[in-house]
Image (cartoon, rainbow, N blue to C red):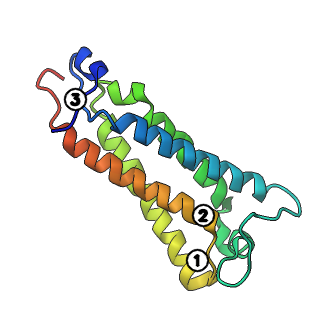
Amino acid sequence: MSRVTEADRAVPGVRRRPAWLAPTTLVLSVVGLAVSGYLTFEHYTDNATLACSIGGVIDCARVTSSAWSTFLGIPVAVLGLLFFVVTLGLCLPRAWRSPAAWLDPARIGWLTVGLGFALYLVWAELFRIHAICLWCTVVHVVTFLLWIVVLFGQILSGPPPEDA
């Protein structure tokens, strides 16, 4: 059985959450935000040298300067930064304790969109650019982990209370 935090018990109408859910999603969101922030900084820095451009298949510079590094004219790094800002807001402990019924579907829906976009970018790296950016891979893995953690966290939380 999963542990429930005291804060979850104290708020009427709030689903019982596993104790690990809020801190895990918070840490993953901060990691994703930090890496996306670094990639955004590097995107807007002249003559930037990403710390993973070691050549061959592992070549961040080739990935981040390719035609695939923008989507609808917006740098993918900026989209990642915005994604993790919203994700951080959805995964703050206060958001997990909120009785708002829309938050659970919004959270998993938002992360599903992010995961779909990450898979699209992995496809572009592997089959169009023929190079892998390790920093981008960190963002993709963090997005996948967030999706898994939130999905299982919501499953383990059980149904919403009757009085919500």
Q: Quadrant of the C terminus?
A: top left
Position above or below: 23 against 49:
above
For the residue marked with disc 3, what is the amino acid?
Answer: Arg
Mark toward the start of the polypeptide (1 vs 2): 1
Question: Disc 1, disc 2: CB below 8 Å?
Answer: yes
Task: Categorize mark 1 by other alpha carbons within 10 Å: few (<14), some (14-19), many (20+).
Answer: many
Residue 58 picture quarter: bottom right
Please rate how many residues cluster around mark 2, counting C-alpha atoms within 10 Å: few if below 14, some from 14 to 19, many from 20.
many
Name, please, the residue furthest toward the left.
162
Q: Quadrant of the N terminus?
A: top left
Dot 3 crowding, Cα within 10 Å, few <14, some 14–19, many 20+: many
Who is closer to the viewer here, 27 or 74? 27
- The image quarter containing residue 22 is top left
Count of picture labels: 3
Q: Secondary structure at mark 1?
A: helix
Q: Position of residue 34 (x, y in %)?
A: 63, 46
Q: Is residue 71 visible?
A: no
Which residue: 31% across, 35% down? 102
Check disc 1 and report the residue beneath it.
Answer: 125
Amino acid type at image mark 1: Glu
Relative to 82, residue 59 above or below: below
What residue sits right under mark 2 in the picture? 136
Please state if 90 lies on the left or on the right of 135 as rendered.
left
Distance between mark 3 and mark 2 Cα atoms:
34 Å
Across and down, in percent, residue 53 comes to 74, 72
Badge 3 element = loop
Numbered badge on residue 15: 3
How far apart, in angstroms, are the residues tagged by discs 1 and 2?
10 Å
Q: Position of residue 143 (x, y in %)?
A: 46, 55
